[in-house]
Image (tube, grey):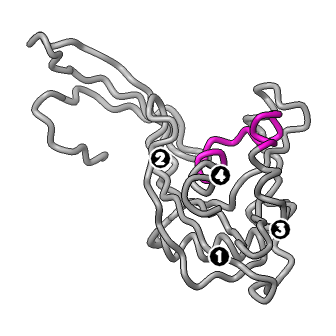
Amino acid sequence: MIAFPKNDRVRIIKVEVLSDDWYVLNKTSFDYLRNNGEWQSQSRETYDRGNGATILLYNLNQQTIILTRQFRFPAYVNGLNDGLLIETAAGLLDTASPEERIKAEAEEETGYRVHHVKKVFEAYMSPGSVTEKLYFFVAEYDPDSKVSEGGGLDHEGEDIEVLELKFSETLKMINTGHIQDGKTILLLQYAALNLF
């Protein structure tokens, strides 16, 4: 059973599991107390995939960052021709803390081992239908912190290309549409305002 936060404006009526394959898709019927004082019956589907973390690795001396490129089936279905998205390293928390998880994801996906990560903010990326909250991090890297080729984990279906790019070029890539991933755009904008 789902544990809902206490809220006097929400009365849960029914929760139905529509799918429990890759993640969990629920349909919830509830009554909501509107601002005008009237109760309204509503129904929403929520996709629960757990919370996640993402990180931008940067090198101020070289003026570079590390990004990844991988196939994303939902983006492919929605018109991205080859389905390949350029992204910051990221992963679901599962049972780990955001800091623990993002250090492991950075190493698995990019091959860089980082010891000191800085959390810069948290955000709900698609709150109209997805429950996931993302924890956003930045960390410095240098050539000596490269411990493997990266590329992700085969048993998780990951086939990740590691990209080291000039920071100034990545901002142009947003404008040209070569970078379309929301979490990546947010971290690049953060870096433009606060790091570079």
Q: Look at discs 2 and 1 and give the one toward the viewer.
A: 1
Q: CA distance from mark 2 to mark 1?
A: 26 Å
Is residue 69 rendered magenta in the image?
no
Query: Which quadrant of the figure has residue 128?
Result: top left
Q: Position of residue 35 (x, y in %)?
A: 15, 16
> Quick one: label 3 or label 4, which is nearer the N terminus?
3
User: Is the residue under label 3 in contact with that under label 1 (CB below 8 Å)?
Assistant: no
Q: Give the number of the disc on residue 188.
A: 4
CA neighbours of label 3 inside 10 A, class few (<14), some (14 to 19), many (20+): some
Q: Amino acid at mark 3?
A: Gly
Q: Is residue 174 magenta?
A: yes
Where disc 4 sits, the SS reads helix
Name the residue nearer the viewer: 196 or 56: 196
Counting from the top left corner in percent of width and height, residue 131 is at 44, 42
Callout 4 amino acid: Leu
**Residue nearest the viewer, comparing 22 with 119:** 119
Q: Which residue is mark 3?
A: 151
Q: What is the CA distance from the residue labelled 3 to the residue labelled 4?
A: 21 Å
Query: Badge 2 local density, few (<14 within 10 Å), some, or many (20+)?
Result: many
Label 1 sits on residue: 140
Instruction: Choose the circle earlier in sequence order: 2 or 4.
Output: 2
- The residue indicated by pointer 2 is 132
C-beta proximity under 8 Å, tags 3 and 4: no
Residue at the far bottom: name it. 144
Q: Is residue 88 left or right of residue 103?
A: right
Which region shows up in magenta?
A: 172-188
User: Of discs 1 and 3, which sits in the foreground?
Assistant: 1
